[in-house]
Amino acid sequence: MQEPFQNTSPDAIAATPLIVPRPEHGISRANISENALKVLYRLKQENFQAHLVGGGVRDLLLGHEPKDFDVATDATPEEVRQVFRNCRLIGRRFRLAHVHFGREIIEVATFRGTTTSDGEENDRQMENGRILRDNTYGTIAEDALRRDFTVNALYYNIADFSLIDYADGLEDIKAGRLRLIGDPEQRYREDPVRMLRAVRFACKLGFTIEPQTEQPLFELAHLLADIAPARLFDELIKLFHSGYGLGVFEKLRQYGLFGELFPATENCLAREDQGFPVTFVSRGLANTDKRLNEGKSVTPAFLFGVLLWEPVRQRFEEYLAGGEAANEAMFLAASEICARQQALVAIPKRFSLPMREIWSMQPRLEQRDGKRPQRLVTHPRFRAAYDFLVLRAEAGEADPELAAWWTRFQEASGQERATMTEGGAKRRRRPRRRKTRDTAGPGTETTGIVESGG
């Protein structure tokens, strides 16, 4: 085998690839989705090249179960659509074909080229080093060059079941090394989201980021400001909802990327006078990782609630000090922090509204008198708000006794709950008003309504 590339250049990519025949690699069709195989075989039957590519190949080689199976072919998106009736074309920046099999979607991408076409639809547009549109089609060798990391540039050829390696991805997999193809700074400038992908793959695979690939991460975090907030939301879900969110959080802070995504939170975490904000976020992410690894459900509302809580809490305290009531103070603090964050990462309302409900219930959980606790436990967000309170208590930010009280209250019987709340001040009932007949004597004015008991 040739020596590993120190810097994978276009000339090196264009060289003869390493081809590993079926007996010499561990990928079996038994571990590939039936629907992915249908797409591969059908394209081959129509005389197109068809390869499994990217993370699916990488994960199969590592003995992991792939989440997705992507296909690369020399068929154009329009030709793929002609082959499959259950196909939809998506995307403008990268035109892709999605072949639908019920809930499973097999993504089919045409080999990307490296030269610019004069066509209006098949073109590649760049601005300030960033790719705005990339629908220039080419060969498999050119497509390998356009892949981001060497470990994602491996092709499984359905024609003979061989592995095709243009970028020494197999060597990097064996070495546990994450390496960008091409000049790292240029590749990050083409698409700054690659910096987040570098962190995600390093954490997911347990790989070390190769020094030349790692160094620009410390210098180019500001480029994330140019990425659409909606796209950053999608990337953050991949980062934090994959079972290794705590490691992702630590690496994002290490490279200065977290501060570009959550500047208000980073400003709070960077303060040396308080330690619980970092503990709170770390515990929240560790709990999320645990739930995901146990197959339990999680929601972005809780995730972003954890990530943004400290700036919300501090602003809440400032409003309280200014004389605002607790409910109004929380409303103002949440509105202010969310408005700032939305400009950076677009959190959909279906998550931002429950997130704010979780926050708004934190002051209400401190009210344990009368019937308020009983009403709170019936609230749709109570369980999430309670979990949030427990997390705060574990981090040293909230009173552990308060969290323990709510734990006991949920487990208590009706009589026990009444006993737990009777020590608080009871709300006074307002007198009822009732209508009466006009029984006043002559010369006496009356409205026909008197206070009961008057």
Image: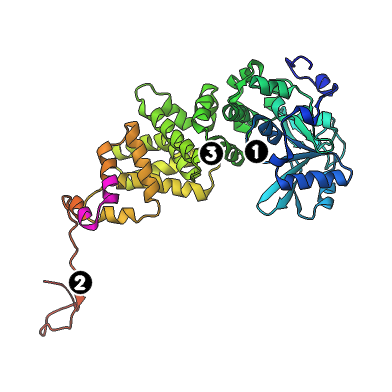
Residue 443: name its quadrant: bottom left
The residues tagged by marks 3 and 1 sit, at their Cα atoms, a distance apart of 16 Å
**Secondary element type, mark 1:** loop
Where does label 2 land, which residue? 433
Start and end of the magenta stretch? 406-417
Q: Nearer the viewer, residue 177 or 359?
A: 177
Residue 246 on the magenta segment: no
Kindly identify the amino acid type of the residue bearing the numbered disc 1: Pro
Q: Percent from the top left, x then y, of residue 177?
A: 65, 21
**Secondary element type, mark 2:** strand
Q: Residues within 10 Å of mark 1 (few under 14, many from 20)?
A: some
Kindly identify the amino acid type of the residue bearing the numbered disc 3: His
The residues tagged by marks 2 and 3 sit, at their Cα atoms, a distance apart of 55 Å
Residue in the picture at 46% in, 37% down: 290
Residue 412 on the magenta segment: yes
Residue in the picture at 69% in, 36% down: 56
Kindly identify the amino acid type of the residue bearing the numbered disc 2: Arg
Q: How many marks?
A: 3
**Can the viewer see residue 181?**
no
- Residue 241, numbered circle: 3
Proximity of marks 1 and 2: CB atoms separated by less than 8 Å: no
Q: Nearer the viewer, residue 153 or 148?
A: 153
Q: Earlier in the sequence, mark 1 or mark 2?
A: 1
Residue 280 left/right relative to 240: left
Q: Quadrant of the N terminus?
A: top right
Proximity of marks 2 and 3: CB atoms separated by less than 8 Å: no
**286 to 452, vertically: above or below:** above
Where does label 1 land, which residue? 66
The residues tagged by marks 1 and 2 sit, at their Cα atoms, a distance apart of 68 Å
Residue 10: name its quadrant: top right
